Image (tube, rainbow, N blue to C red):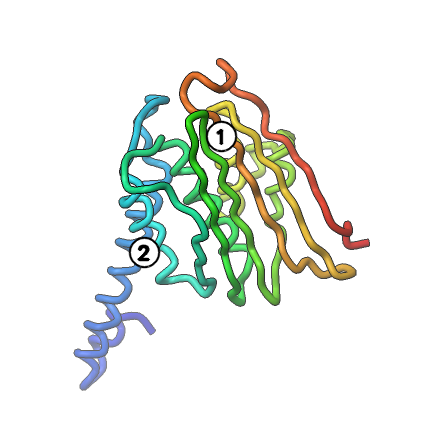
Amino acid sequence: MNGIEFLSEDGMGDDALQLIADSAGRAARRLSFFRMALGASGNIDERVAAGDLRSALTGYFADERARLDVHGWPADGNVLRAHGGIALCLAAVASQAMPRGGMVGLDWQTGPTGSTLTVSADGATVRMPETLVQSVEGRMDPNLLDARTVLPFVVAEMTAACGGRLRIASDWSGTDLKRFAVTADLPGIGFGSQHGTMAAFEQTGNAGR
């Protein structure tokens, strides 16, 4: 039952208004997150405040079953928006891979030549996103994507566009995936390939056979 249906029930007005407020808050946090992650103007050197990225990330995980553990984050100041968008999208991909909850780890290190960020998914039930490997290897047909599977493809395209590289590591126990991590090596302006590079795939751990 949604908030509008509650309003038609006797004595349910306060509960309905609270439900509507909660739903509106969640929608606003989601909108803020994806606007920050995907709303770049197209300028390769566009920058955004690291604190604004962190706020959007915190808001997103307020509504997720998975928890967020940030090991490293850029110091207060401006960072390349493309790098920030990749960090946010990878965190969302990791969270969506754990429908029963778990821990999303994020380590973002910046230097004079670019950024290295690693996002991991660690939980009791971890599912490798079905389009992640194909997208990272550059063999995903975009015509087969839908709203549920598009985000890994977007991450791979964003990474390639800025001349970066993706690596995937996974840990298995028999046929059960216990953990996976995606590392993005992202060059700064003037340090990457002029035309970008295809994202690359590496897998470690048992293959689950």
Q: Secondary structure at mark 1?
A: strand
First in sequence: mark 1 vs mark 2: 2
- Between residues 153 and 20, which one lies in front from this camera angle? 153
* x, y percent for residue 111: 43, 31
Q: Residue at x 43, y 48 (%)?
A: 72
Amino acid marked by disc 1: Leu
Q: Secondary structure at mark 2?
A: helix
- Nearest to viewer (mark 1 / mark 2): 1
Q: Quadrant of the N terminus?
A: bottom left
Residue 154 placement, left or right of 27: right
In terms of image quadrants, where is residue 143?
Answer: top right
Residue at numbered disc 1:
186
Kindly give the residue lying farthest to the bottom in the view shown: 11
Amino acid marked by disc 2: Gly
Q: Residue at x 45, y 28 (%)?
A: 114
Residue at numbered disc 2:
59
Kindly give the residue lying farthest to the top in the view shown: 194
User: Is the residue 42 above or below the residue 5 in the image?
Assistant: above
User: Which mark is drawn over residue 143?
Assistant: none
* x, y percent for residue 171: 69, 54
Q: Residue at x 75, y 61 (%)?
A: 173
Determine the CA span between mark 1 and mark 2: 25 Å
Residue 201 placement, left or right of 118: right
